[in-house]
Image: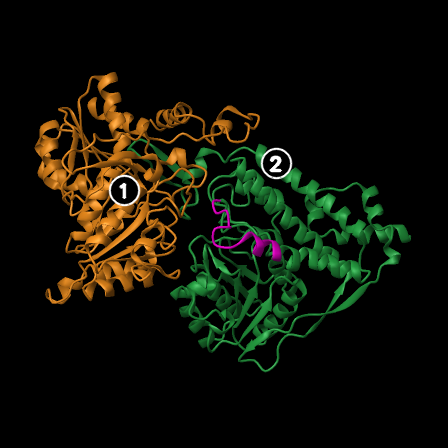
Amino acid sequence: MAAAGLGLCRLAVLASGPGPLRAGVWGRLPPLAAGSRRHAAHFTFQPDAEPSAHGQTQKMNLFQSITSALDNTLSRDPTAVIFGEDVAFGGVFRCTVGLRDKYGKDRVFNTPLCEQGIVGFGIGVAVAGATAIAEIQFADYIFPAFDQIVNEAAKYRYRSGDLFNCGSLTIRAPWGCVGHGALYHSQSPEAFFAHCPGIKVVIPRSPLQAKGLLLSCIEDKNPCIFFEPKILYRAAVEQVPVEPYYIPLSQAEVLQEGSDVTLVAWGTQVHVIREVATMAQEKLGVSCEVIDLKTILPWDTEAVCKSVVKTGRLLISHEAPLTGGFASEISSTVQEECFLNLEAPISRVCGYDTPFPHIFEPFYIPDKWKCYDALRKMINY
Amino acid sequence: MRKMLLAALSRVLQGPAAAAAARPVSRVVVASRNYADFASEATFDIKKCDLHRLEEGPPVTAVLTREEGLHYYRTMQTIRRMELKSDQLYKQKIIRGFCHLYDGQEACCVGLEAAINPTDHVITAYRAHGYAYTRGTAVREILAELTGRKGGCAKGKGGSMHMYAHHFYGGNGIVGAQVPLGAGIALACKYFGKDEICLTLYGDGAANQGQIFETYNMAALWKLPCIFICENNRYGMGTSVERAAASTDYYKRGDYIPGIRVDGMDILCVREATKFAAEHCRSGKGPMLMELQTYRYHGHSMSDPGISYRTREEIQEVRSKSDPITLLKDRMVNNSLSSVEELKEIDVEVRKEIEEAAQFATTDPEPPLEELGNHIYKNEPPFEVRGPSQWIKYKSVG
């Protein structure tokens, strides 16, 4: 079983295109010419159709849609401020380009290198009544701020009996694997925050979703953490409305209706399972229902359970390690609610229980082949 | 007899690099041809250091012997060429991920190493290739770690930011996180009573992290033999020190900890200051803070061109006026410690060594897939690491 899985992994690496391990598998290859070694991504971004309900649209990638959302916020809300490391010149991922010139240096400013300080400071700004949008440069660096988020931000309203709150705080951080990030530029820490009542955790899958969800997070009267899949910053391009629009939080979206298996994911992984659904349809004749969870906390239990009642099988996939990953929470709730509807054990296809590796990344991530394999085993259960 | 002595001495001059690459005897003899024409040592005036809470500082003159000079020159040149080679390999996409280069700052790591014993301890942040080398890792192992091969010093599992060696604790990615660790190592040194100290390095960006100040307090309270060293290269990624810090006198930031500000481009200045600080710590007086004023030629990492927040003229100016290798070279040549030809010969040898190392790094195989699950925990018997699905498991050998 393990060998078959391993064999499939190796096959997957070869099938998915040139990669750093290809030479290792086949033996010594002569070094390729400079520039010709493009490493293929493990997913294909699938854009949504252009929305017609929100006025004029413009072609934007993920970081441009974030800039657009922040631009809308700063223009409509005079108390809004954006701060973080290197946001003034535009940010390391260009999410805040042009905002300082447009709105002034009192509203878009850099902080020194101190995550705990940034979030603590953000909580203070929010409690005083202004809208605070804090940027943590990489989700991997959010841990010095963990105490501030969990002990201060999440519990402020509760412990003051609704006298005070830091609801106008939104924390943004680039999230997820990027192909070459290694241990400290690839982490997906949503599971750590899912364990903390009082905050909301949101992860978009595309520019269109990102702008709407970010604007909703900023409007929301609770402190929100908005994780942006960094691998999609340039790779995902869609037609996005220029005017503000809001996508409701805590509502999962069914991207594709199906009758045999339910597939749930968020962020980049949504595009992977969409491909898996297509593969399942073509090769196995299996009809899959694909759900993008969008909000991790509080998550849409209704939508997922309703789908599982219909299909009877559930596969959840995320990049974060398996043990204690958010898939375990979904799995546990679904088996409580829909036990008699289940036809097969709930399958979780996640990252390994290891730190995010440096050279082993293509083997580590739950790519479409691993998901497809799990799906097949579920169908044949 | 004289020829044998010269041969032996030249082999010594070549320093740690000689262990990695066998050299034919004929070359050794060529290098020592003009030995008799050179002085054996020279005394130099070095810049006086700014002091904080100290009555006296490090000496203002330093003695450099010929052997030391050649050794420092070779080491700095090796690090310089190794970093430039990494730059080249990165642009060819043979090295991927993050790569933070150390060229321009060589005087810091070589000067520090010259002042401490191999039994002392060093910990730094992610700009670690230079320290990995001075602490004893071979160039080929460093380059192989960068390319992620099994011949790398961390078996290819760490990459650029995670290189370790004997009494060198890395190589740490999270900014500022290594400083409390350094204080802990210092506590262990004091506890074991072996007269060892710990050099804890961090950058000007990290100097604003909260945990640094927590560490200052603990180290001063318990008089730990820890030298805090702030490598101030004027820019924390893209933010200049004036825009990040309320006080840019990093040597004073320890408040109750005595501090010195050192010219980090002059290797002798670094060496003398470190000797002074090491003395202070070893005598049980507690920690000390050193700020090394230095400069990096490359950007923060390979994805940073390094010219959007500073001008090319500034980089050029530092390169022409304060390059550490050029400074040492001029000093040695002007004081008859060496000749231009001899140093050029060392350059040629270093280049060859780096080429060989790069060749090794490019052709060595990647670590086997089983390594993915290893070394998570220390465990006997080996346990199973859960993989992406119920049936994919790896054996983890601790």
Residue at the (32%, 43%) spot, across then down: A63
Q: Position of residue A12 (x, y in %)?
A: 38, 25
Q: Which residues are magenta?
A: B303-317
Residue at the (15%, 52%) spot, across then down: A220
**In the drawing, what numbered circle is on residue A11?**
none
Q: Which chain is green?
A: B
Q: Which chain is orange?
A: A
Asked if both marks, 1 and 2, belong to the same chain, the answer given is: no
Q: Nearer the viewer, residue B149 or B302?
A: B302
Residue at the (39%, 60%) spot, across then down: A113
Q: CA distance from mark 1 to mark 2?
A: 45 Å
Q: How many marks?
A: 2
**In the drawing, what numbered circle is on residue A65?**
1
Mark 1, chain letter? A
Q: Nearer the viewer, residue B380 or B100?
A: B100
Task: Tell me, yes or no, whether the highlighted magenta stretch contains residue B307.
Answer: yes
**Is residue A59 left or right of B212 when viewed as pictured?**
left
Q: Give the SS element for disc 2.
A: helix
Residue at the (42%, 65%) spot, across then down: B208
Q: Position of residue B10 (x, y in %)?
A: 80, 52
Task: Tell me, yes or no, whether the highlighted magenta stretch contains residue B265.
Answer: no
Amino acid type assigned to the residue bearing label 1 in the image:
Ser
Q: In the rendered image of this protein, does residue B196 appear above or below residue B6?
A: below
- Colour scheme in use: by chain
Residue A193 seen in render? yes
Residue A324 seen in render? no
Q: What residue does disc 2 label?
A: B360
Q: Position of residue A331 (x, y in %)?
A: 18, 39
Q: Residue furthest right?
A: B1
Q: Residue furthest bottom?
A: B55
